[in-house]
Image (cartoon, rainbow, N blue to C red):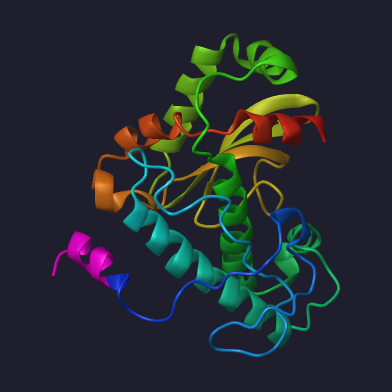
Amino acid sequence: MNKRQFLKSSVLMGAGAVIAPSIFAESNRPSSHQTPNSYEPIPFPQPPLPYAFNALEPHIDAQTMEIHYGKHHAAYTKNFNQLAKDEGIDGKTVEQIFTEIDKYSAGVRNNGGGYYNHNFFWLTLSPKGGGEPTGELLKEIEKSFGSFSAFKETFSKAATSVFGSGWAWLIKQDGALKIVSTPNQDNPLMNISKEKGSPLMCIDVWEHAYYLKYQNKRADYIAAFWNLVDWNFVSANLLK
C-alpha cells in the first residue's frame, strides 16, 4: 500500500472526530461535552470547524479535511489533554503554557502546538476567503513588504522552503509584520521559538494537509491556499 492509499484508507478507521460546542476563543475553558471514548470534561476541547468538510473544495478536498481534522487534529487534542493532566498543568491557557513551554515535556510541546496551530489554521481559511486584504492590514503589508504581491511571494517561498514538516506564519513582531516558519508543531508564541510574535495567519505544510490532492506538489497547494485566506480573521488579529 502506498502513502496515498494509506491516507485514504485511514478515514475508515477508528471513531469520528472529537467535537466540542465551543468557539476557538473559548477553547481553553472546561466543557461538559461527552466524547465517544470518555465521560470526563475536556479542559482543552477541539472546537468544531466553522464550515463543512467539503466547503473548501476545489482547493482543499473533503476527504483531506475529514482526515486532517477528524484524525490528526483530534489526536493532538486527545494527547495534549492527557499529557496536561499527567504533568499537572492546570488553570492555564494554551498561550500561557507556550510562554514557558521549555518547562514541559516534548509531548506537551508537540501536541499542544498541534492542538493550537490547527485551531488557528482552520480560522485562517474560509469558503468566502481569497482576494486581497483592505484597510489597515493592507497598509501594514505594503509598509512591511512593499506590495501585496511581494508579500504573497515571500510568504509562499517561506512555506515552500520549510524542510520536512512545519508551518509558515505572518506575525506581528515589535510593531511590524514579519514572515517566519517553524518546524514540526512549534509556533511563534513558544518561548523556544527563534522568532517570536503574535500570529496573524498561518499555513500548515505537513504532508497530510495536502498529499491526497496534490501529492508531493506543495507549491500547488500553497498557490491554492490564497483562494481561501480569510482576511477578516487576519485583520482582526492585527487589530487585537
Q: Is residue 191 above or below residue 57?
A: below
Side of 187 relative to 152 (left or right): right
Indicate the quadrant containing the C terminus: top left, top right, bottom left or bottom right. Answer: top right
View extreme (top): residue: 146
* Residue 191 seen anywhere in this rendered image of the structure: no
Residue 7 within the magenta-colored segment of the rendering: yes
View extreme (right): residue: 91
Q: Is residue 143 above or below residue 204?
A: above
Q: Nearer the viewer, residue 80 or 31?
A: 31
Point 59% across, 82% down: residue:
35
In the rendered image, residue 97, in percent from the top left (x then y), is placed at: 77, 64
Indicate the quadrant containing the N terminus: top left, top right, bottom left or bottom right. Answer: bottom left
> Which range is magenta?
1-9
In the rendered image, residue 151, in percent from the top left (x then y), is placed at: 54, 19
Q: Nearer the viewer, residue 82 or 11?
A: 11
Residue 151 within the magenta-colored segment of the rendering: no
Point 66% across, 40% down: residue:
195
Which quadrant of the structure image shows residue 83?
bottom right
Point 55% across, 49% down: residue:
122
Point 66% across, 90% down: residue:
39
Side of 47 relative to 73 (left or right): right
* Residue 155 seen anywhere in this rendered image of the structure: yes
In the rendered image, residue 112, in percent from the top left (x then y), is placed at: 63, 66
Q: Is residue 28 above or below residue 222?
A: below
Q: Is residue 144 above or below residue 171?
A: above
Q: Nearer the viewer, residue 93 or 130?
A: 130
Tell me which secondary structure the magenta stretch mostly adopts.
Answer: helix
